[in-house]
Amino acid sequence: MAAIGAMPEINGLRQKSRRSFVTLILTFLTSSQSILIVWSKRAGKYEYSVTTANFLVEALKCSLSLAALIRIWRKDGVTDDNRLSTTWDEVKVYPIPAALYLVKNLLQYYIFAYVDAPGYQILKNLNIISTGILYQIILKRKLTEIQWAAFILLCAGCTTAQLNPSSDHVLQAPLQGWVMAIVMALLSGFAGVYTEAIIKKRPSRNINVQNFWLYVFGMIFNAFAIMTQDFDTVMNDGFFHGYSLITVLMILNHALSGIAVSMVMKYADNIVKVYSTSVAMLLTAVVSVFLFGFHLSLAFFLGSTVVSVAIYLHSTGKARR
Amino acid sequence: MAAIGAMPEINGLRQKSRRSFVTLILTFLTSSQSILIVWSKRAGKYEYSVTTANFLVEALKCSLSLAALIRIWRKDGVTDDNRLSTTWDEVKVYPIPAALYLVKNLLQYYIFAYVDAPGYQILKNLNIISTGILYQIILKRKLTEIQWAAFILLCAGCTTAQLNPSSDHVLQAPLQGWVMAIVMALLSGFAGVYTEAIIKKRPSRNINVQNFWLYVFGMIFNAFAIMTQDFDTVMNDGFFHGYSLITVLMILNHALSGIAVSMVMKYADNIVKVYSTSVAMLLTAVVSVFLFGFHLSLAFFLGSTVVSVAIYLHSTGKARR
């Protein structure tokens, strides 16, 4: 009887350690992703077309999910939870996140008419706030007041850590730039929260089935992006023009971190994802000091302090329920 | 019976509103103090000797306390609580804060050999942390964990709000500069906390008696400072050389805010004082936009956000005792 009584606790522990594990993996992958980007920039401009790389990322994720599924089918047999069901009712929700990201990526081309690149980096932190708001509205899970305070601090801290002498330009950005940034933040927040809603809707459903469908539509939408944006380049120079070792590593990294994001959505939530990517941003800066001889600014230390306090508050704020 | 039962609540309310009142006054005075400093700098360099002005501030505070006492003696008669007792046992503690401030001000001359003026502004925020630590150790009043988090945020937020392109120099400051800054922060934190301890030791003692003794020793120590630092200037050019309308306003303001600090120590505490002066710093910046056409930086907005969250957390963190 005692052993049975202890079961939920062991399950809780297992869930908690799985959640911590996927969160750590996501933090590590996101951080090394930024380092690869810096590395590729140092090695020279992007020479490959970004749309083909994005397509390959989706294709790779899709293949990995399918491979995992096949292994599971061989081991456990095909069950209701790991079957690749193709009913419209099941599949119809999966194109939505991919479509949202596509619209967001298209907007990204236009926002640079109003905001410069460092300004855009700053404005991207609005994602944190939009994710918090949409998480609460759509997933109907409540953050406590302390957790909200922590989330505002996370946004302020990340922005502070990224401050540089030209950041103030963003305050002079025209209204259109701000509106577009807010719309983009809402789109990307909505895509994230919607993905979590899909994945969590049937908790017993195998994550690889859910991922497979997400990534199939990712491939379709990215194929569309190649056609509209890079058709000529691909036709003239070939699909893999300009690819290098770094490009391959970046694709591999993006694919793995994409899967890690899904895992975090399944076993944790969007809030954990936002904290994880924020910590990754700080980690990247610290690692860049050693790798590329970057200097850390006072603003970085202040921002990191605020982010650390935010993480502490988020976990304390949870305790009282 | 019901009326008697309600008495402590009314007293509590009165205490709370008195606390809010002195805090608001302190915030207002500190903020206008900084504005006067900016104004006087714009009008030209300090031409008067700072030590004589400091002496006059102490003399004015002392006279105001004495005037208030005389009014009280006339109204209520001389009681045990408002008598100007001159026993050594009573008076011996009052020179200590004045002496600490003197040492701190002397150090201030030397720190500029290691740290530039904007860097010193940044390092002064260490006062916030030292006050928190000494408050807890010496006054033995515990801040909750959330309140500590809030205090760290207050420090980070104030520093962020003051960031400017040359702030990063402070990271290159030599060790001596940092050590001196920490010693100065500890001295000023200790002086503040010690003053609170003196004032709160006998809560029934009239605040004007306590202020009188504090300011008498303030006068004595500042007279000493005139002799050691500005003796020649005062002898050759006269005591009031270089005084202008702004100088007089600044002396008046310093005197009133000095008294407001004492009031805050009596009816609230050092923590409230630190919050109050931090908010004053932010207010000053906002008012300077209108008065002097200053621009607010993105760092200022981020810092203000963090300070606002800190204030919210400080008051929420208190509730759970």
Image (cartoon, coloured by chain):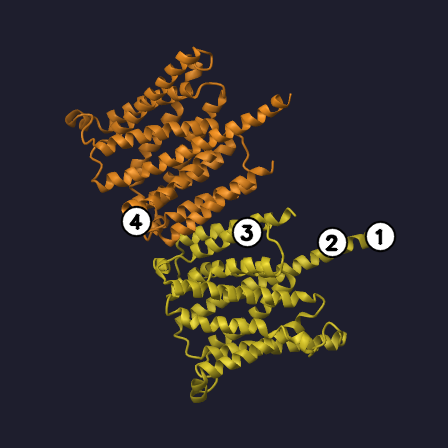
Chain colours: A orange, B yellow
Count residues near mark 1 (Cα–Cα under 10 Å), then give few for <14, some for 14-19, many for 20+: few
Residue matched to label 2: B9
Question: Residue drawn at (46%, 58%), measured in percent from left and top?
Answer: B286
Checking the image for residue B148, the label placed there is: 3
Residue matched to label 4: A294
- Of the residues under marks 2 and 1, which one precedes in the sequence? 1
The residue nearer to you, when weighing B269 against B64, is: B269
Question: Marks 3 and 4: in contact by CB < 8 Å?
Answer: no
The residue nearer to you, when weighing B278 against B252, is: B278
Q: Is residue B165 left or right of residue B76?
A: left
Q: CA distance from mark 3 to mark 2?
A: 28 Å
- Residue B40: tell me if it is visible: no
The residue nearer to you, when weighing A65 against B64, is: A65
Residue B192: x and y, percent? 57, 65
Residue matched to label 1: B1
Mark 1 or mark 4, which is nearer to you? 4
Same chain letter for marks 1 and 4: no
Mark 3 or mark 2, which is nearer to you? 3
Mark 2 or mark 4, which is nearer to you? 4
- Badge 4 marks a residue whose secondary structure is loop
Residue B321: x and y, percent? 65, 48
